[in-house]
Image (tube, helix red, strand yellow):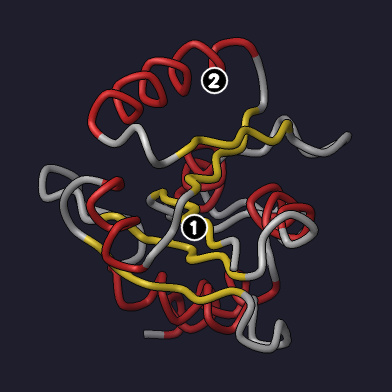
Amino acid sequence: MNIAVFPGSFDPITNAHVAIVDRALGLFNKIYVAVGVNTTKKGFFDHDRRLDIIRETFSGYGGAVEPVRFEGLTVDFCRKVGARYILRGMRNTADFEFEKAIALNNAVLAPDIETVFLMSSSGLAHISSTIIREILTNNGDVSQLVPAAVTRAMEERDSL
């Protein structure tokens, strides 16, 4: 079984992330969408809410996509779940340089785990969680950029 880990903060998950997972399911039998814990960052959504949003987003995928929370090194988490692949999406050349450095270091730490890069789908390369958070902070409409679960989560958050 080909298992991949798609690590990130997913704060929030975007349509670009979903497109990467959709395309990667042609390569992998199972994908863990792994929400990493960064203790130095305060998220827009807390980790539990992000996981709920991701679960809702991929609820119709029959278990092929499993949202999980993890701490520590991605390669250690890969070993824990039996994944031989790390899945990463790239939007542009700046992403490439950043991701290449991480992939090369991961290869030193875990030569048995391969990083697989997928380019963003046409029309989605401009979407980033950072930009989405900025739009949300300023009460903008992100409904065309994120899964419906994110929009619902924002509505719930605003009603509190």
Frontmost residue, 126 versus 63: 63
Say which amino acid is labelled 2. Asp
Return the x and y of residue 133 as percentages of the image width and height: 47, 47
Label 1 secondary element: loop
Q: Nearer the viewer, mark 2 or mark 1?
A: 2
**Residue at mark 1:** 12
Q: Which mark is residue 129?
A: none
- Report the label total: 2
- Asked whether the viewer can see residue 115, the reply is yes
Please state if 72 lies on the left or on the right of 67 as rendered.
left
Q: Earlier in the sequence, mark 2 or mark 1?
A: 1
Say which amino acid is labelled 1. Pro
Q: Which mark is residue 95?
A: 2
Q: Quadrant of the C terminus?
A: bottom left
Instruction: Residue at the far right: name it.
Output: 122
Q: CA distance from mark 2 to mark 1?
A: 18 Å
Could you classify mark 2 by the number of other residues whose Cα lies within 10 Å: few (under 14), some (14-19), or many (20 or more)? few
Return the x and y of residue 110 as percentages of the image width and height: 29, 36
Return the x and y of residue 127 as percentages of the image width and height: 67, 38
The residue shown at (27%, 23%) is: 108
Could you classify mark 1 by the number of other residues whose Cα lies within 10 Å: few (under 14), some (14-19), or many (20 or more)? many
The residue shown at (36%, 60%) is: 35
Q: Quadrant of the N terminus?
A: bottom right
Label 2 secondary element: helix
Frontmost residue, 132 versus 113: 113
Q: Height in image: 31 above or below 112?
A: below
The residue shown at (55%, 54%) is: 139
